[in-house]
Image (spheres, rainbow, N blue to C red):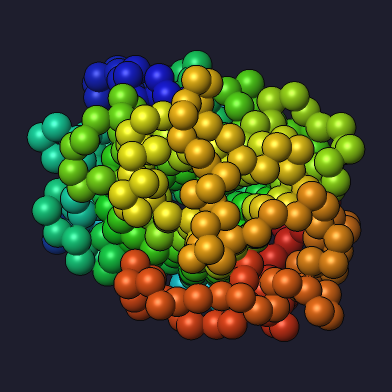
Amino acid sequence: MNPFKNLQKLSALALLGLATMTSCNKDETTPTPNPSGGTVFTTTTLADGTIQIEGNTGSDYTFESSKSYLLTGFVYVDSGATLTIQPGTIIRGDKTSKGTLIIRRGGKINANGTAQSPIVFTSDKQPGSRNPGDWGGLIICGNAPVNLPGGEAQIEGGPDASYGGTNPNDNSGVLRFVRIEYAGIPFQPNQEINGLTLGGVGQGTQIEYIQISYCGDDSYEMFGGNVNLKYIISYKTTDDDLDTDNGYTGKVQFGVVLRDANIADVSGSNAFESDNDATGTALTPNTKGIFSNISVFGPKQDTASLVNSNFKRGAHLRRNTQTCIYNSLISGFPLGLLVDGTTCEANANADALQVRNTIIAACNAPLGTASGSSFNISNWFNSSTSGNSIQYDATGLSTAPYATVPNFLPVSGSALLSGADFANQNMDGLEVVSFRGAFGTTDWTSSWANWDPQNTVY
């Protein structure tokens, strides 16, 4: 996340005008009135049978698996409407018009795929020609609390959609067995759209078995809200993998990050990045995402590996965040964990910011603080009650995470196969397992994840 993203906002009228001007060439039509009084998307059947989707819907609509769809411009699901996407459906995003799907507050998405028939959002380019930022991404806005003044804000990236509210149980629908590939197009400089953007999304929403691949910005960014995520993949993204701010208080369990040594962002790429807000205020709710059983395989397979100089930290905790990381592996970054700034150091000393039962491996500098800091991060991280440890290489941990088809399972005798602890009340409601990192003896990515989307024919 670029710290200046949220400082640059355009008016809703300008945004809508630009989205219209950049739409694909076609015979213009108008949204079709619905008998219930709502509008539906403007649709055009293209020469190859693809259904081009534009505009917004105020009525329920279904993307059918027997058809393919092209998102053109900013496509909105309005309050009161539900977009249902059948298992196995392919949805592409148009690059010229910055095709993006936005679920507005009060709207819902029902994208309930299966392991055998995942739902795929991907580039409209041909195999061999796909790149990060080929289209926008998926944005969901909800009514759950955020810590911004007034309790709401316009979502980053340019859409005319606000997020935030007072309902922590808000339900924006279901995302299950969904892949999002080659998203992250810049709307304006430093205003990229993420792979999956969750703004004020509540815990009534179900999000699990998600793979985000080759995103041009962050894979997952949570702006406030308290939605929980489970079984998630961030694969060769450009900027950050797990970005939280503006009062996010949800729980994320079982997630794997795999980076490409050559793909990083000029803003500095991290696996975890977390702020309370853009300027580090004490506004509440304080950002306190709970992460457990996360495996980070950074760009460096060992400390001698040469990687893009824009890679920075496995976890950058800053600007008064209280994010907590448990039972996890952070490996392969130039710097493993950075607790950045006096407010975060105070949070760590007060036990509000926690890192427990976590292994840092194959990082040139495992631990770091801001320049001039007197905080003894080594004593804090290695305290007798933390359960943390540092390995200067990743030998004996995982099978073959950097293989063409990754094998993330721990090797026999790996330290990852034991050592997890769920006694901490912050982890109430999480699945209790004995292993650390995202995997025990079962590979939950098998059958539905795609490790070669560049060459997949959809």
- Residue at screen point 81% across, 79% down: 413
- Kindly indicate the quadrant of the structure image that contains residue 197: top left
x then y, percent, for residue 114:
57, 77
Residue 432 placed where, x, y %? 48, 82
Which residue is at a point 36% across and 46% down the rendered structure image?
A: 349
Looking at the picture, tell me which residue is in the foreground, 265 or 194.
265
Q: Is residue 279 above or below residue 314?
A: above
**Quarter that holds the C terminus:** bottom right
Pick the front one: 368 or 63? 368
Q: Where is residue 370 in the image (x, y as percent from the top left)?
A: 50, 26
Q: Which of 35 and 82 is in front in this view?
A: 82
- Taking the image as shown, residue 391 lies to the left or right of residue 41, namely right
Q: Can residue 125 be seen in this view?
A: no
**Left or right of 383, for residue 107:** left
Q: Can residue 417 be seen in this view?
A: yes
Q: Residue at x 31, y 29 (%)?
A: 280
Viewer-nearest residue: 23 or 13: 13
- The residue under the point 52% across, 57% down is 383
In this rendering, position of residue 107 left or right of residue 50: left
